[in-house]
Amino acid sequence: MEITTHPQITEWLEECRKETTKKIYEYGITKFFTWYADYLKKKNQPSHQPIETVCV
């Protein structure tokens, strides 16, 4: 599942007033979670953790 299709993220992105803002946020979110997934692999951490618990 692509991270930006998660229901909570989609709902949050819908609040953006301009399409360009939405695209910039999508890009940033995707970059962060790509980095985070790589970080988990390097540190041998479990990667099956639900997204809701990642940045609490």
Image: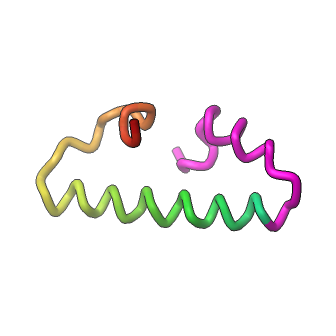
Question: In the figure, 53 relative to 5: above or below?
Answer: above
Q: Quadrant of residue 29?
A: bottom right
Report the residue that reaches farthest toward the left: 44
Q: Position of residue 12 (x, y in %)?
A: 69, 40
Which residues make up the magenta segment?
1-20
Q: Residue at x 87, y 59 (%)?
A: 18
What secondary structure characterizes most of the magenta part?
helix
Q: Quadrant of the C terminus?
A: top left
Question: In the figure, 9 relative to 52: above or below?
Answer: below
Q: Residue at x 62, y 33 (%)?
A: 8
Q: Residue at x 87, y 53 (%)?
A: 17
- Residue 13 sits inside the magenta stretch: yes
Q: Position of residue 44 (x, y in %)?
A: 12, 53
Say whether residue 54 is left or right of residue 41. right
- Residue 47 sits inside the magenta stretch: no
Q: Position of residue 1 (x, y in %)?
A: 52, 44
Say whether residue 41 is left or right of residue 51. left
Q: Quadrant of residue 24?
A: bottom right
Q: How is the image coloured?
A: rainbow
Q: Residue at x 64, y 33 (%)?
A: 7
Counting the numbered discs, the total is 0
Report the residue that reaches farthest toward the right: 18
